[in-house]
Amino acid sequence: MKFHIETWGCQMNDHDGEKLSGLLLAEGFEAVDSSAEADLVLLNTCSIREKAVHKVYSELGRLRQEKLQRPLLVGVTGCLAQQEQVALFKRAPHIDFVLGTMALKQLPRLVAEAQAGKARVMDTGEYPDNHLFPPEVTRRQDTAKALVTITEGCNHACTYCIVPTTRGPERHRPFQDVLAEVRSLVDRGYREVELLGQNVNSYAGGCTFADLLNRVSEVDGLEWIRFTTSHPMNFTRDLAQVLVENPKVAPFLHLPLQSGSDRVLKRMLREYTVGEYLERLGYLGEARARIALSTDFIVGFPGETDEDFEDTLQVLEQVAFDGSFSFVYSPRPGTPSLRLRDDLPMTVKAERLGLLQTRQLALTKAANQRFVGREIPVRVEAHGPNESGWWLAHSGEWKTIHLTVGPGRSLPFGELVQARITLASPHFLGAELV
Ligand code: SAH
Ligand code: SF4
Ligand code: F3S
């Protein structure tokens, strides 16, 4: 049996894909690179915005045609599976099974039942031990940085967000368990980990998130720790201190702001004002200048006025984020924001998004410019595309580095090397090996 997994969405979903892949390999299945070669295709889905869902349905449509030509099992996992559950079979009757986000370990059973000819197999139950996944089973894709789940679910209730529905309430992995996994990763050669959760900084697996970072940093041989993603209200002084003082915690912080207008933040139920957000950034003190900051914005939230949007642009300039991810508000089924009047034309929303992204590009370029001439450590990940002559790497600040080395030279994957930054664009830093 050959399988292929198509994953959309965030790092958490990528990592779930690595777990699902490991479960199938443990059953003796073989991984292949495309659905065309596979007997089993898993669509590991995202439903954060409507567009993400469209992509899934369009792929399901394509697989329906393939299923007419040859025997093929199709399973749907991930957030859309958890959200739609049995309704997925109505919309796409050729789906063989549906597996929810809190039942990953049930995959082999579901596949076996589907193979035995059972129709519409489904498990979208909430298994409270889902986050206690056997680390040795996981089949990691990335050889430079290992993803490690520390918490699943979200206890916030942002009015636009589907995640509390698709991922359930918070469940925390005991810190001893996290440490054991990180140690085993280092034994296998990893030097960098990224701790994952819908909301990592509300971590409560026997210690605080700040403590967890310190404990993980004590693992011998580990060089960098990253984490994603954080809620501003759970960003404490202790956490800021660890980020500033612990050299193993990479100098990068993703702290989603969503809007620069208090009025909009309130309607989003984000639980903070712009002032409180800025105050928390202030916890970083002078180190703020060397820690790369990124954020998320939603534009065109129901009721967002020109002034609200101006406020967002103003905060964008004031903070001068290194980068931001921005999206037009997308109404999600069952979320409270559906009840808010949303009469802003799409053209206006799209225009706002364009303005924000143009400004961000300029800010990113300026932020990157400051690296030119500096020598910094970067981790080597891959060759650039064919014959390009450069290697792909990332800095501690999570800047994409295009590293030029002399002809015929080879670099060690996964290792840190010293690079001199020679060129800055909004999308990457050009560098030479020192
Ligand atoms: N847990 C994370 C968010 C995960 S979703 C946090 O709270 O920061 C990633 C981003 O998608 C969010 O930060 C938000 O900017 C965006 N997003 C979430 N729901 C959305 C929606 N309904 N429409 C548009 N963007 C949305
Ligand atoms: Fe969604 Fe808000 Fe939870 Fe983030 S904190 S996952 S935006 S509900
Ligand atoms: Fe998408 Fe689910 Fe992640 S909705 S962004 S895959 S938590």
Image (tube, rainbow, N blue to C red):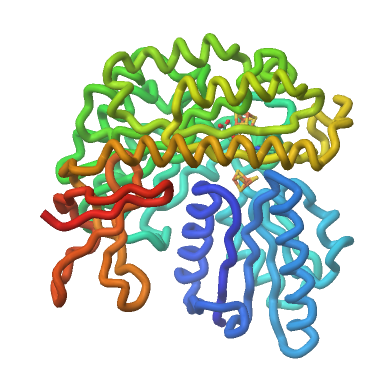
Q: 51 or 89: nearer the eye?
A: 51
In this rendered view, identify the residue nearer to me: 219 or 14.
14
Instruction: Indicate the quadrant where residue 4 lies.
Output: bottom right
Where 74 sits versus 84, above or below? below
The quadrant where ligand 3 appears is top right
Depth check: 2 or 132 in front?
2
- Pick whichever, 253 or 35, lies toward us: 253
**Along the horizontal axis of the image, is 42 left or right of 150?**
right
Q: In the rendered image, which quarter contains the C terminus?
A: bottom left
Q: Is residue 130 above or below residue 123?
A: above
> Is 247 located above or below residue 332 in the figure?
above
The image shows residue 30 at horizontal and vertical percentages of: 48, 79
Write the residue at 71% across / 22% down: 268
Q: Is residue 165 left or right of residue 144?
A: right
| Picture quadrant of residue 411 | bottom left
Residue 25 rendering spot, x and y as whole percentages: 46, 71
Task: Tell me which corner region of the image, top left, top right, bottom left or bottom right, holds residue 252.
Answer: top left
The answer, for residue 163, to whether it is visible in the render is yes
Relative to residue 90, is residue 299 drawn left or right? left
